[in-house]
Amino acid sequence: MRIALAQINTAVGDLDGNRALVLKNLHEAESMGADLVCFPELALCGYPPEDLLLKRDFLAGCSRSLQVLAHEVGETAVLVGTIDLCEDLFNAAAVIHCGEVIAMYHKHFLPNYGVFDENRYFAAGDEGLVIEVAGVRVGVTVCEDIWYPGGPVESEVAFGGAELVVNLSSSPYHRGKHRVRESLLQARAADSTAIVAYVNCVGGQDELVFDGGSMILHPRRGRLASSPHFVEHILHCDVDTTGLWAQRMAKPIHRYMRQGALRRPTRVLELDGQESPPAGGRPPLNIQDIAALQDEEEVLQALLMGLRDYVRKNGFQDVLFGLSGGIDSSLVAVLAASALGPSRVHAVFMPSRFTSAVSREGVESLAGALEISLENYDIDEILHSYLDQAGPSLEGPGGDVALENLQARIRGNILMNVSNSRGWLVLATGNKSEFSMGYSTLYGDMAGGYAMIKDLLKSEVYRLARFINEREGKEVIPAVILEREPSAELREDQRDSDSLPPYKLLDPILEDYIENGLTIDEMESKGYDRGLVEDVISRVDANEYKRRQAPVGIKITPRAFGRDWRLPISVHRPPRGS
Amino acid sequence: MRIALAQINTAVGDLDGNRALVLKNLHEAESMGADLVCFPELALCGYPPEDLLLKRDFLAGCSRSLQVLAHEVGETAVLVGTIDLCEDLFNAAAVIHCGEVIAMYHKHFLPNYGVFDENRYFAAGDEGLVIEVAGVRVGVTVCEDIWYPGGPVESEVAFGGAELVVNLSSSPYHRGKHRVRESLLQARAADSTAIVAYVNCVGGQDELVFDGGSMILHPRRGRLASSPHFVEHILHCDVDTTGLWAQRMAKPIHRYMRQGALRRPTRVLELDGQESPPAGGRPPLNIQDIAALQDEEEVLQALLMGLRDYVRKNGFQDVLFGLSGGIDSSLVAVLAASALGPSRVHAVFMPSRFTSAVSREGVESLAGALEISLENYDIDEILHSYLDQAGPSLEGPGGDVALENLQARIRGNILMNVSNSRGWLVLATGNKSEFSMGYSTLYGDMAGGYAMIKDLLKSEVYRLARFINEREGKEVIPAVILEREPSAELREDQRDSDSLPPYKLLDPILEDYIENGLTIDEMESKGYDRGLVEDVISRVDANEYKRRQAPVGIKITPRAFGRDWRLPISVHRPPRGS
């Protein structure tokens, strides 16, 4: 039995486009003699559709699209993620064969943590589904269903005799997640003595990136084949179930699973006319097994795909940003030029009297080397005009801070001028350390439509910049930018370290607080200074109001400032030491 | 049996303050001879705590706070909403008596729609709880539990003999919701032939306002007593269950309920030493039954409480905003002066050459009448400075729009100058019609920490302004402001109607699309022009990116642009007519 896993890049809401993409991949798989072609979770509507699922006409459109698709499907069976609106709304896998939707499987386990809100939309399924394709019994599951023991995988194996379990996923990327996934899927394959075929989507959607990495795992032989990350791909594989039955009979776990598993009703459907291989045989396969990406390369690819898809899916051609001569905007420049090509990338340098010669040199050399356009606007005169015309607005105990923020806001205005007049997308260049601590100006350097590195701590920004230089074997990001001390250059001799702990102390605390959820006590016992930890946490908490108005950006860590971070703004904060 | 319902205004995260507030109310109820005092859902931690519930030390603090509270509780029993962290995390009602937490009830139905995300945090309970207090059997429920038939109310009545069902709620306000609540609670009382005692919280928390309106309903006699809306209050009532038993025996519904209800285990606990009334009797009660507020009065009170609490709970003293002479900022001025007192309210007038004499007069007369401070900054010179120094940034096909937006952003900057230098909160003054259509400038008129009227359509802004004038019997909002044609005054002779359909056509479409979820077909069949509807919807959808960076504001409608509106930014939009 030949299976194809189609790792595609759909667009949320593009019902016609997604269906066309499914068909294109189906035809390619057919030409390779596939018996079964599998597509990701909710491929027909794009993932995650969020509150589009509350719109009646959107749901009707999804249902129509599935019917249209079915008419195009012949002998090669299709498993595709879609919604099913019947007695309630389900996150479903449709089985299509010979022009008809012959079965619908309903996802059992609905994730409602992290970035997920599936209980908001869907009812949970409670039936297993096994289809027999070319003599192989195939269990059907959707994403989360395979993450838990005791779920439909066990029912389908125990009561439906599944030897291959297909999992349709749309699993958002975070750093290193593919390793977690593979070990989980391998464990599920081993427990159930079944081959697992996992198909994931790729692409960027608002704050999420999907990294693909579809794979086929054998309970004993491990990974049989896998797709690359961050690109569309069809993974073909001939599934050989020889020996699985005997292994099961020899292992007591199957008898216990059968006793222990929740006895979910499990339908078994045999597809007609699939017993014999096609006349003339099938084209030979060149089985692919792609090595995983190294950590920084993986992050780099995620950022490039995230930006590229945000730009494309929102109908932009060009992007712009303020290039300051600092590391953050320099990294953004390099990433944008790489993602979109330099002709679509525009830097704006907006010096003031506090801007150093080093900054100017860095900006000019970087823009020149990247061959991106560079505009220059000096902001001093504009600043003076505010002082002349609205001087009293800057008077008060926070006058110095107000003056610094105003410079950042003048720059934000100029970027928005360009954006509004020319239709280009503004990239905000802030990093996660800044967003965490509120070391950024609302409507100033936070202005923009997409904050592509907002989920990278400052030290990760440096690490990625150095990685890019090493990978390219040259100073893509000039050494002068990498080696200078970080400064916002909003007053004379300003340094980030005037307002923040050194990043090498700060970033581990931020990571432990935000991503790892450690308490102050736990951090103290790890050896951090308690006072420092309390200071940092109190600043992170107090700056929620800024983050709430921040642009979306690409999730890189297990906990980004996006859908997976839902803190109140109004929170009583106990005095220190309490 | 004497019950007290304590409708209190807690603060999210203020464990000590909330406990002190509970104790203060407990002591007051004790002095009135209460046998049982009931507090709202999650009163000890404040509602909604959102992702604070993912913090281990926060949960530990909540558990400690409950134990500390228990030590202060004597003969008068307490029912208080809190979390229960045992084998999992539950949204719970703690029963406290004589120094001890004697039982925990776990909420069964976890809302996960609209603004709610309770599946993200809590496990669902599956046991009923009935406590016998001074001879009356009291069923315990939390919020959503009483909204569905077939839930714990029926189990507690059928298997625990409850004659009084207490419901601890933290039910967010939207316009007219109290009527829905009362009819629902009355139906539940009638179905179960039980008295229902409903206690809700009051106060503002970010985008939500809680409106109180606690009440006691009798299955036959209807509302026995009720609390006012939007203020803290203790509702005392002597519960008389006479006749309920006989009514149940005479009604077949109870036998069917017993057969039909899910047989949830239901604990019955008798509290010691509560059979006899206290020596010396109890003070007499003056039973309160407060008439509901009229629609506009209700909205007004919600806005005032929302603003007052946002300011207080975030540690601000003063607020400021741009006063333009238009209806939106004028209404905000009136509301802010009323909520906070005029000495804490500061208007900033920022005219340009496009500002009309009418605007200037309106601003001066309103600020004078309200006795709020008024600063003036002319923005023309600053605008010229941008043109001189950054002219090319404004060149392009969208140059005219860019120039309009820049004016709004200069104003936004000046407001932020004042905010940063003096520590005052900026109020954004946009309305829901503008937020819907994107008829507003990011970082310009959208700048601010709190957008208090963002959930009022333009026509509702007018309605509320007229209501205020009628209520006060004078032109609080000058007629000249109410009667002029709406204009952003960003270019010569500009009118809102240049860019938007007339509000009397636009607002009903927005309401049907956003709040009522109607499809284009449904709206056409209501008589709207199809082309107009398509235009409006496409603009609403396309401006999601702006709303995502908007300040929070007060939810007034069943569907506000906040936690209950989760649309993707990147959505493929089909060409018109498809």
Image: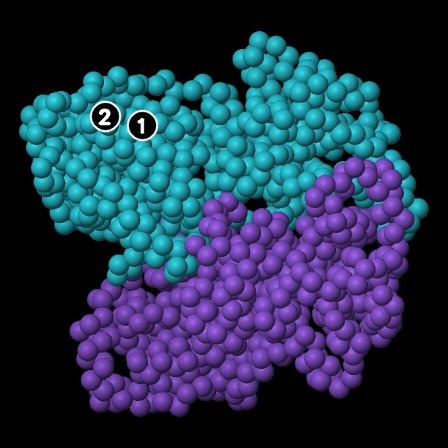
Chain colours: A purple, B cyan
Answer above or below: position of B540 versus B356.
below
Mark 1–mark 2 Cα distance, whole angstroms, equals: 10 Å
| Disc 1 target residue | B234
Answer above or below: position of A527 versus B388.
below
Residue A183 position within the rendered picture, expressed as x and y whole percent measured from the top left: 41, 80
**What is the chain letter for disc 2?**
B
Residue A452 position within the rendered picture, expressed as x and y whole percent measured from the top left: 66, 63
Residue displayed at 15% across by 28% down: B1
Q: Are tags 1 and 2 found on a single chain?
A: yes
Q: Secondary structure at mark 1?
A: strand
| Circle 1/circle 2 CB separation < 8 Å | yes
Residue A143 position within the rendered picture, expressed as x and y whole percent measured from the top left: 42, 67
Label 1: how many Cα within 10 Å (few below 14, some 14–19, many 20+): many
Q: Does residue B4 appear in the picture of this structure?
A: no
Q: Is residue A143 left or right of residue B544?
A: left
Q: Amino acid at mark 1?
A: Ile
| Disc 2 target residue | B32
Q: Secondary structure at mark 2?
A: loop
**What is the chain letter for disc 1?**
B
Q: Amino acid at mark 2?
A: Met
* Of the image marks 1 and 2, the number of the one nearer the N terminus: 2
Q: Residue furthest right?
A: B388
Q: Is residue A294 left or right of residue B175?
A: right
Residue B517 position within the rendered picture, expressed as x and y whole percent measured from the top left: 50, 38
Mark number, residue A120: none
Residue displayed at 62% across by 78% down: A296
Answer above or below: position of A570 versus B226.
below
Q: Nearer the viewer, residue B3 or A471?
A: B3
Q: Nearer the viewer, residue B322 or A507?
A: A507
Label 2: how many Cα within 10 Å (few below 14, some 14–19, many 20+): some
Residue displayed at 67% across by 24% down: B372
